[in-house]
Image: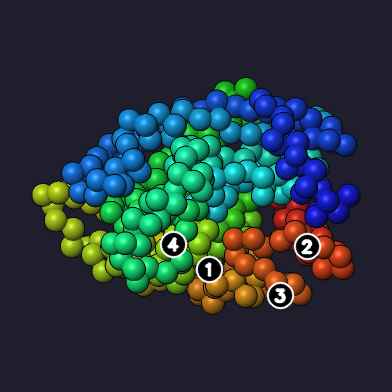
Amino acid sequence: MEYTERHKELALFYRQMGDGGILPGTGIRVLKVSFHSHETVNYHPEARVPNEFTGFFNAEGMKKVNDNFTYYIFMPSADTGNKGAIILLHGLNERSWEKYLTWGERLAADTGRPVVLFPIAYHMNRSPLSWVDRHLMMPAVAARLLKDPSINMASFANVALSTRLSVLPHRFFLSGYQAVNDLLSLISQIKEGSHPYIRSNGRVDIFAYSIGVMISQVILLSGEGGLPSDSRLFFFCGGSSLNRMNGTSKLIMDSRAFERLLSFYIDKIDTLPQTTDKKFSDIIHNTPVGVAYYAMSSGNRYDKCCKDRFRQESDRIKTVTFANDRVIPPAGIADLLAGTDYEIRSPEYEYIHENPFPLMRGDSSGIVDSEFDKLFTTAARFLA
């Protein structure tokens, strides 16, 4: 079955599967695994939050849903004893795994390896369900626009993230910091042989998309020893420094939030007041993960902190991106990943970064199906 039809079938399966099941027409089992995060950074700026937006900063509520969560494993039917796992990382401000079901299935089927769909902190099922409820979020959109009518791309889908980053841009790094440490814990669990379903005698690789690529790059640059030396990284539509991105999108964040993000991380990060931001500053400047995120904020900082590290690791990195990607444009990726295996493709259909494989009808669906097949054939060959 081609991608377009399979996407629809798996989306229906996902809504009905509960705690797991077998993907229709395959022997691939879907397992639901519990995870507890130990890496929360307690940083509570409630006093700075406007009254109408305090719900987005409910520290106790956020901690509960973010720190104890579940992730999925797509487990092929054949023996996977010496095949380790592939960890699949998603994009920024995503709240549902539906988009990635076909991705995970294809990787598991073509490589014969378990595929882990792991949520970034405060994303997917690690965020409140209310954040994707149009009726609950539209009053917050109206309040945000009332305060600043010049905002572009405000929407019910991005108002939670936009508000949180506008009020406290520190959250971008802090959630990423937690996500990296969660992933290092997962990788350690697998390699130590303590994972309940994945054996230790195989590679742990990463298939990363969008902001998931930056998280993967930080893991590699941090040099913590958490990423095994034989691990491979496949990057899709991502890989540039933060200052070469354009996150303004109705599906990601509004214009004011992205302006605030760039202003904070490019212009202010080196001059944070030690009275109020000392803890944050210590993490970002004095921890390996923090320094890696700092390096990823701009090309100049990468050159100073980690020059040529990606080139030195080129045998384990493969990147594919699309020519018309406006969120993470190819030029920024090419600059940062110079010297690695990097490919720009030009699909012959209308797409956006947030939806590289749109569902279409008629002949157009066949073109999308073909591009999807091409991408995941490339990925599976690299990660097999």
Helix, strand or loop at label 2? It is: loop
Which mark lies nearer to you, 4 or 3? 4
Q: Which mark is residue 247?
A: none
Q: Could you tell me if residue 312 is visible in this image?
A: no
Mark 4 or mark 1, earlier in chain: 4
The residue singled out by tag 2 in the image is: 360
Three-letter residue code for mark 2: Met
* Residue 39, image x, y percentages: 37, 35
Three-letter residue code for mark 4: Ala
Three-letter residue code for mark 1: Ile
Q: Residue furthest left?
A: 275
**Residue 23 or 135: which is nearer the viewer?**
135
Q: Which mark is residue 346?
A: 3
Looking at the image, is 329 positioned above or below residue 76? below
Where on the picture, by quarter, is residue 2?
Answer: bottom right
Looking at the image, is 34 positioned above or below residue 366? above
Residue at the image point whose x is 71% and y is 75% from the top: 346
